[in-house]
Image: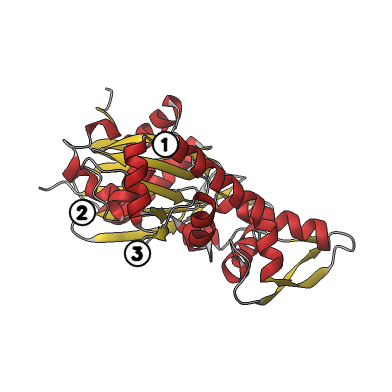
Amino acid sequence: MWNKRLGIDLGTATTLIYVYGKGIVLNEPSVVAISKHTNEILAIGREAWEMIGKTPEYIVAHRPLREGVISDYEVTRRMLTYFIQRVCGKSLFKPDIVVCIPSGGTEVEKRAVLDAAYRAGARKAYLIEEPMAAALGAGIDITGPSGSMVIDIGGGTTDIAVLSLGGVVVSQSVRVAGDQLDDAITKHLRKKFNLLIGERTAEVIKIEVGWAVPPKEEKILKVKGRDLVSGLPKEVALTSSEIYKCLSEQLSAIAEMARSVLEKTPPELAADIGEKGICLTGGGSLLRGIDEMLAKALGTPVYVAEDPISCVALGAGKVLDYLKLLRDGFLYTKREK
């Protein structure tokens, strides 16, 4: 087969590309730096991410996806084209591409992703819901008559689904995920300390001292930002307990959504899930204690997948092998001439 087969996790925060037979070959922030004067793209991916909050007035470091949805179609298309060309080089053969989308996306949102994939150079493009891809990437057998539940906590959305016989039985998507946790930290520092920080700093705080349960070890992190009163640089000390409290509201929303999905699950499948446990994937699953918090809230065992960040892209890459079994999990369109 001359055509490359790509699985793409086109995420709000990060884009990962899996090449069939090679594994994950690209892991870059979904960020584009653009000149306001010329509309020229100056940087894409990690280089653009490093510019966030540090650009001169005529450059904007832009995230073209928000809450799992394309917010700037043209910039998304150019970013996707750049990433695909990096992976495929100057091959004469167009790749077959599977792109992951949040559960419950609208037809307009699905068409936008498909069209972006075709215009970026796909020969054939398929869409698959993120929880199904995450389950495949985590090594879960979803083709048999047994229930499995996946909670994929990404940058813009948390996707929750119960899967059986190669399809989605119950699913919901909530726009509470990594970005909203970062926003909660930013608002807390603004309210308590009159301190303004950037989104990169908020993410560092979450990674360094964030907890989903009362911290098992107290850690102190010194954070620098701009004082909103004086306008001058300022440093404050944050504790793990403090960040745990400011994240609790957003994490409770994820737990409530997961409970809602379980309540809608047929009893036979719910019994399977109670026996096998719930699988956590996505970058948000790396927050300390989130498996413990969800297990307590749901009364069901919860575990983090072996490679949670890569699961969706890995699953997207495996999907073409399961095409006949998973037909209901796809939306596929031939390119319109």
Tag 1, which secondary structure?
A: strand
Residue 60 visible? The answer is no
Front-lying residue, 273 or 40 = 273
Tag 3, which secondary structure?
A: loop
User: Mark 3 — residue?
Assistant: 306
The answer to which of marks 3 and 2 sits earlier in the sequence is 2
Which x, y percent locates residue 186? 71, 57
Extreme residue toward the right, this view: 230
Q: Amino acid at mark 3?
A: Glu
C-alpha span from label 1 to label 3? 23 Å
Task: Using a 10 Å C-alpha cutoff, classify the residue at mark 2 as few (fewer than 14 neighbours), some (14 to 19) or many (20 or more).
Answer: some
C-alpha span from label 1 to label 2? 28 Å
User: Mark 1 — residue?
Assistant: 171
The reply, left or right, for residue 327 in relation to residue 284 is left
User: Mark 2 — residue?
Assistant: 20
C-alpha span from label 3 to label 2? 20 Å
Residue 269 visible? The answer is yes
Between marks 1 and 2 in the image, the one whose residue lies nearer the viewer: 1
Q: Quadrant of the C terminus?
A: top left
Q: Amino acid at mark 1?
A: Ser
